[in-house]
Image (cartoon, rainbow, N blue to C red):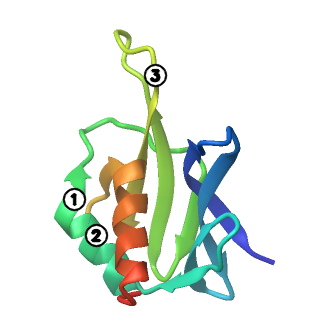
């Protein structure tokens, strides 16, 4: 059985929703776009993406939303909607054991992972 975290979803030109997931299966992390084969994501690739794009969370920010635990780190989605904004934004939170949690827009993380995995750098 796998655990999964909804990373991103978008509306296709035909009106259908396409969902992108991070899944943990037998202790390994996988990236899966519905309708496509899943791809294994190494911790190094995920760390590289978050090192490049992730920003530290502000003090007092609670990230107690959906969560996966894999290979010594916690992965979570943080939904943020300031008072003046109509549309909420989903942030991907990467919290390694050996450092502070960092966050980046989930759409950016999904795009970066999809690009690297297409290139075979998984």
| Quadrant location, the N terminus | bottom right
**Camera-side residue of 21 and 66:** 21
Which badge, 2 or 3, comes first in the chain's sequence?
Answer: 2
Q: Are marks 1 and 2 in contact (CB under 8 Å)?
A: yes
Spatial distance from mark 2 to mark 3, Cα to Cα? 25 Å
Mark 3 → mark 1, Cα distance in angstroms: 22 Å
Task: Name the residue beneath numbered marker 2.
Answer: 49
Mark-to-mark CA distance, 1 and 2: 6 Å
Q: Which residue is pictured at 65% across the width and 73% down the height?
A: 36
Q: Locate residue 1 relative to residue 30 in the image: left or right.
A: right
Whether residue 89 is visible, yes or no, is yes
Residue positioned 34% across, 54% down in the render: 108
Q: Are marks 2 and 3 in contact (CB under 8 Å)?
A: no
Question: Which of the 4 image quarters holds residue 84?
Answer: top left
> Image point 43% across, 60% down: which residue?
110
Dot 3 falls on a residue whose secondary structure is: loop
The percent coordinates of residue 120 (x first, y second) are 39, 90
| Label located before the other in sequence (3 or 1) | 1
Front-lying residue, 113 or 56: 113
**The disc label shown at residue 87, or none:** 3
Secondary structure found at label 1: helix
Label 2, secondary structure: give it: helix
How many other residues sit within 10 Å of disc 1, few (<14), some (14-19) or many (≥20)?
A: some
Residue 96 visible from this viewpoint = no
- Residue holding disc 1: 53
Residue appearing at x 27%, y 45% in the figure? 57
């Amino acid at each position: 059985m796998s655990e999964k975290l909804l990373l991103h979803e978008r509306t296709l030109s035909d009106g259908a929703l396409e969902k992108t997931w991070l899944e943990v299966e037998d202790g390994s992390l996988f990236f899966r776009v519905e309708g496509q084969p899943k791809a294994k994501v190494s911790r190094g690739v995920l760390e590289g993406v978050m090192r490049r794009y992730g920003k530290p969370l502000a003090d007092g920010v609670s990230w107690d939303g959906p969560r996966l635990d894999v290979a010594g780190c916690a992965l979570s989605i943080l939904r943020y909607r300031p008072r003046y904004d109509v549309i909420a934004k989903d942030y991907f939170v990467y919290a390694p054991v050996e450092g502070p949690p960092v966050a980046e827009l989930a759409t950016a993380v999904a795009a970066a992972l999809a690009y690297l995995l297409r290139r075979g750098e998984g």
